[in-house]
Image (cartoon, rainbow, N blue to C red):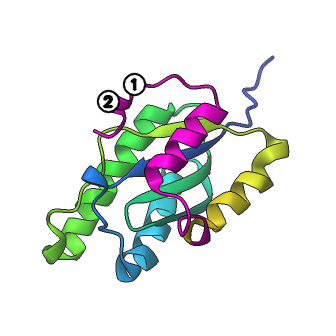
Amino acid sequence: MAHTLTDLIAHIVFSTKNRHPFIDAELKDRLFPYLGGIVRQLGGKCLIVNGVADHVHLLVHYPPMRCVSKLLGILKSNSTGWVRETWPRRLSFAWQTGYSAFSVSQSNTSDVYNYIANQERHHRRISFQDELRMLLQKHQIAYDERFLWD
């Protein structure tokens, strides 16, 4: 086959450092579009970004020349620098070191999109920690609780 043809979609989740509630309404309104813009600059397409005070979810079509870990490294470092530069009072803003990423089939994209769109309502009844445990179990990803929250 002469051409590379892909449909790589990921549901990506990561938290603020120590799950500190950094993401208030002011930051959310500018940060989420900024994250989508970084994904676009890297050749991907961000279908949705949403989250609450201590974490974000992204649904991303990512290009085959970018592995998820490199995409996330650029996304997190660039957005951290931008937040600190744009709001000098937010110099302590940081993301957690790790992330979670789940592959999404084209047939399940709308369900994941809706799940991400409803984060505020969802987190009225479930914590980020319980949500992440549920996602890891659903995707049959083994984890060690001692290292999950670094």
Decide whether residue 124 is among the magenta residues.
Answer: yes
Q: Residue furthest right?
A: 107
Whole-percent x and y of residue 28? 42, 74
- Quick check: can you spot residue 63? no
Whole-percent x and y of residue 130? 50, 48
Report the side of 140 relative to 126 (left or right): right
Disc 2 element: helix
Instruction: Tell me the magenta residue range.
Output: 121-150
- Quick check: can you spot residue 45? yes
Q: Residue furthest top?
A: 1
Q: Amino acid at mark 1?
A: Asp
Seen at 81% across and 17% down, the residue is 1
Q: Amino acid at mark 2?
A: Phe
- The correct choice, above or below, for 79 with respect to 1 in the image is below
Task: Give the residue pinned by disc 1.
Answer: 144
Q: Residue furthest front?
A: 125
Report the side of 70 relative to 44 (left or right): left
Report the side of 68 relative to 1 (left or right): left
Q: Which mark is residue 132?
A: none
Whole-percent x and y of residue 7? 74, 37
Q: Which corner quadrant holds the C terminus?
A: top left
Report the side of 44 relative to 80 (left or right): right
**Mark 1 vs mark 2, CA separation in Å:** 6 Å
Q: Which mark is residue 147?
A: 2
Seen at 31% across and 66% down, the residue is 21
Task: Please say if the residues under marks 1 and 2 sit with CB atoms less than 8 Å apart.
Answer: yes
Viewer-closest of 25 and 69: 25
